[in-house]
Image (spheres, rainbow, N blue to C red):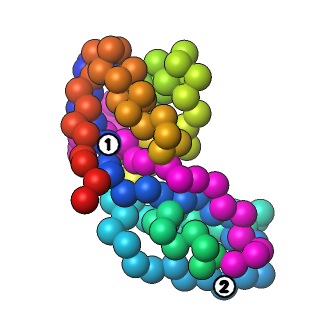
Amino acid sequence: MSRLKLRLHAEQLAVGMVPAHVSLALTGGTAPIHGSLTTEAGRTIIFPYSLAAESGPDVRVEGPFRALEIDGPLDFALTGVLAALLAPLADAEISVFSLSTFDTDWILVPADAAVRAAEVLTSAGHTVDIEESQ
């Protein structure tokens, strides 16, 4: 896999697990990515960490995270994109939550390890533009 260009977004995110019986809509913030994915176990949501306190007692919340966005769009025929990024992060013992959209892939890393993650990926030959908090 060739060198990839990424952007480390500034806003902190949360990942939540919403039980099937709970109706929840968290809106607000300027999250670079937000949404949900539903399975039989419930609904996994990605939302601004600033709204975590509003999620309620039934929702399990993890975070804060920061998002690394791969510069896209990525061709569906590409192989090894996530492997090229996740292997160096795993070697550095940085945990991840990865997801894909139609145009690109996203990697959420713990907020307190985000700058280190950018350094690890840069050392692995990738380019990471770091968005500063406002």
Taking the spot 35% from the left edge, 29% from the top edge, the residue there is: 118
Residue type, mark 1 in image: Leu
SS class of the residue under badge 1? strand
SS class of the residue under badge 2? loop
* Mark sitting on residue 24: none
Q: Is residue 13 left or right of residue 95?
A: left
Tell me residue 15's x, y (percent).
58, 58
Taking the spot 61% from the left edge, 73% from the top edge, the residue there is: 53
Residue on which the image places disc 2: 23
Q: Is residue 27 above or below residue 86?
A: below
Residue 105 visible in rendering: no
Taking the spot 58% from the left edge, 69% from the top edge, the residue there is: 52
Q: Is residue 76 above or below residue 92?
A: below
Q: Nearer the viewer, residue 83 or 9?
A: 9
Which quadrant would residue 41 be assigned to in this image? bottom right
Q: How many marks?
A: 2
Q: Is residue 60 left or right of residue 72?
A: right
Calculate the distance from the C-alpha at mark 2 to the C-alpha at mark 1: 31 Å
* Mark sitting on residue 8: 1
Q: Which circle, 2 or 1, is nearer the viewer?
A: 1
Is the residue under label 1 in contact with that under label 2 (CB below 8 Å)? no
Quadrant that contains the C terminus: bottom left
Which quadrant would residue 79 be assigned to in this image? top left
Q: Is residue 76 left or right of residue 57?
A: left
Q: Earlier in the sequence, mark 2 or mark 1?
A: 1
Residue 58 visible in rendering: yes
The answer to if 57 sits in the magenta stretch is yes
The answer to if 77 sits in the magenta stretch is yes
Tell me residue 97's x, y (percent).
55, 43
Residue stretch in magenta: 56-79
